[in-house]
Image (cartoon, helix red, strand yellow):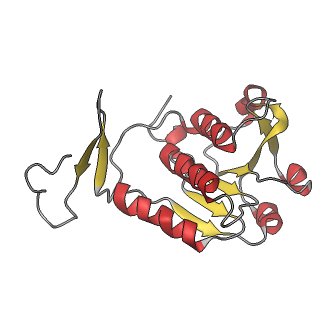
């Protein structure tokens, strides 16, 4: 898949997580955000806002770099009515992903809507596409990863700007390289762990 100018990696993709329940499902919403970030989405809109979760995700960006951001959202219907791009609602009840993805042309922006326990019926009509990766019960995170992979391709292991830590591929064990902050000179010998 192309990664240069006007390729999938140039698409602006954002994610809306509907129905987040602060204190009840921060792990699932965190995994939605981490998946969006890893595949190259620009931001996550979280409804309702959760400053604690947003702060934790900001700390991931501080350590591993990049410009992914989390924004709280209180009125998703109004937001969707005004969204300037293509809205794709991920739902087990939607059309098969492979039958509609060919209609997703141009650079975007794309908004992928990931629902919670109960999605308001109006969301189905506000979305341009209601899409299913399977018609069996499954995780929102799995659906998001598959759709992001189709939109943007598998993420390359490029270094993200501002990264203090970089995970290194390893056949066994964990290897993490620490990077010196800008202007601090090279890292101390043995900084890779």
Left or right: where 41 falls relative to 130:
left
Please name the residue shown 53% across and 34% down the image: 153
Please name the residue shown 75% across and 72% down the image: 74
Q: Is residue 97 visible?
A: yes
Residue placed furthest toward the front: 24
Q: How many numbered circles does the render carry?
A: 0
Coordinates of residue 67 in the picture (x, y in percent) = 45, 60
Q: Is residue 13 visible?
A: no
Left or right: where 190 falls relative to 171:
left
Coordinates of residue 139 in the picture (x, y in percent) = 69, 40
Coordinates of residue 102 in the picture (x, y in percent) = 71, 30
Please name the residue shown 64% across and 48% down the image: 108
Query: Eyeballing the image, is 127 above or below 169?
Result: below
Residue placed furthest toward the left: 189
Left or right: where 163 falls relative to 45:
left
Left or right: where 149 falls relative to 126:
left
Please name the residue shown 63% across and 70% down the image: 50
Give whichever of 12, 35 is nearer the camera: 35
């Amino acid at each position: 898949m192309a990664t240069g100018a006007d390729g999938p990696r140039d698409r602006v993709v954002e994610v809306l997580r509907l129905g987040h329940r602060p204190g009840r499902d921060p792990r699932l919403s965190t995994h939605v955000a981490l998946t969006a970030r890893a595949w190259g989405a620009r931001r996550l809109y979280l409804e309702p806002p959760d400053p604690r979760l947003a702060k934790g995700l900001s700390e991931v960006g501080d350590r591993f770099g990049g410009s992914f951001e989390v924004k709280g959202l209180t009125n998703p219907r109004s937001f969707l009515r005004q969204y300037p791009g293509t809205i794709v609602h991920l739902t087990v009840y939607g059309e098969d992903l492979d039958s509609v993805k060919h209609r997703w042309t141009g650079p975007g922006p794309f908004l992928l809507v990931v629902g919670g326990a109960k999605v308001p019926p109006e969301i189905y009509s506000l979305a341009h596409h209601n899409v299913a990766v399977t018609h069996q019960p499954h995780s929102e995170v799995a659906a998001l990863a598959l759709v992001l992979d189709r939109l943007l391709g598998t993420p390359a292991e490029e270094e993200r700007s501002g990264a203090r830590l970089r995970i290194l591929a390893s056949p066994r064990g964990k290897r993490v390289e620490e990077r010196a902050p800008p202007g601090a000179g090279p890292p101390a010998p043995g900084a890779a762990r």
